[in-house]
Amino acid sequence: MSYNYKLKILPFIVIFLLIVECLLVYPTSIVRADSLSTPYEQRIIHSPDGIGKYYMGREIAKVMGYIGAGWLERPSREGEEQPSKIVSLLNLKPNDVVADIGAGTGYLSFRIAPLLTAGKVLAVDVQPEMLEIIELFKKEKNITNVEPILATLSDPNLPSESIDLALMVDAYHELEYPQEVMQGIVKALKPSGRVVLVEYRGENPFIMIKGLHKMTQKQVRKEMQAVGLVWRETKNLLPQQHLMVFEKHDSSDFS
Ligand SMILES: C[S@@+](CC[C@H](N)C(=O)[O-])C[C@H]1O[C@@H](n2cnc3c(N)ncnc32)[C@H](O)[C@@H]1O
């Protein structure tokens, strides 16, 4: 390679190295916004467990596909997560209407439904295959007050002011459009309605689950506040998750 040739290509090499440095050191600087008005940003360099889309500083996790349905129904789940305790911590009333958002196989829905002797569970999911599994369990368990609802990625498809409680267990972190879904949920809540989020504790590095499948309380509160929800309490009684309770209105507004 002649000296002249090397001199000619040098500027290109320098520019190439600058771009690489930019990508590695400042990944947030290479951002493709969906549109100027969205709260999301798309980053090129991101976790293999995420979709590269960020919301309020958090990368959104990949959706757990229906192929993983067996994992949701694993017999060891009661010992690991104590879902029966989740149900008892909800303080349900017999006539409550509960939306189980991201219901999956309906693991929680079918444990809640028997308590709602005059109410029902709306089991909401985006995967039709999950809803088929719910239909199958409905017949097998002979439970009639679980209604499967097919959501879109950005709309839970719930009627206005129709639900007393929206429950999300291990689901919120994988919503592709968290702000739009939460706005839909807030609209669907009755005036005294509650939102309960159960997520693996992001503050604890010893909880052996992928980082994007955990959330810190600080992050959850920030994201709920963005849609007008008011934090009420966090129940730290589960082995690995925190259970956070939010309300539609700040009751101090009425005092
Ligand atoms: C990890 S699973 C948890 C299932 C269930 N909550 C449980 O604990 O057994 C998360 C579920 O959320 C669903 N999901 C993802 N995005 C959703 C959305 N925008 N609306 C409703 N469900 C969604 C997925 O299809 C998946 O079934």
Image (cartoon, rainbow, N blue to C red):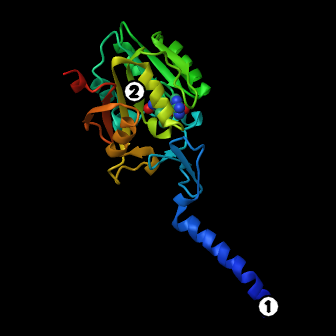
Mark 1–mark 2 distance (CA, rounded to whole Å):
68 Å
Q: Residue furthest bottom?
A: 3
- State which mark lies toward you, 1 or 2: 1
Q: Nearer the viewer, residue 182 or 14?
A: 14
Q: Is residue 66 left or right of residue 199?
A: right
Rendered position, 190 above or below 103: above
Which picture quadrant has residue 38?
top right
Q: Amino acid at mark 2?
A: Leu
Residue 252, image x, y percentages: 21, 26
Q: Earlier in the sequence, mark 1 or mark 2?
A: 1
Badge 1 marks a residue whose secondary structure is helix
Q: Quadrant of the C terminus?
A: top left
Front-most of 127 and 141? 127
Q: Which residue is mark 1?
A: 4
Q: Which residue is mark 2?
A: 167
- Residue 111 picture location, percent across and down: 39, 21
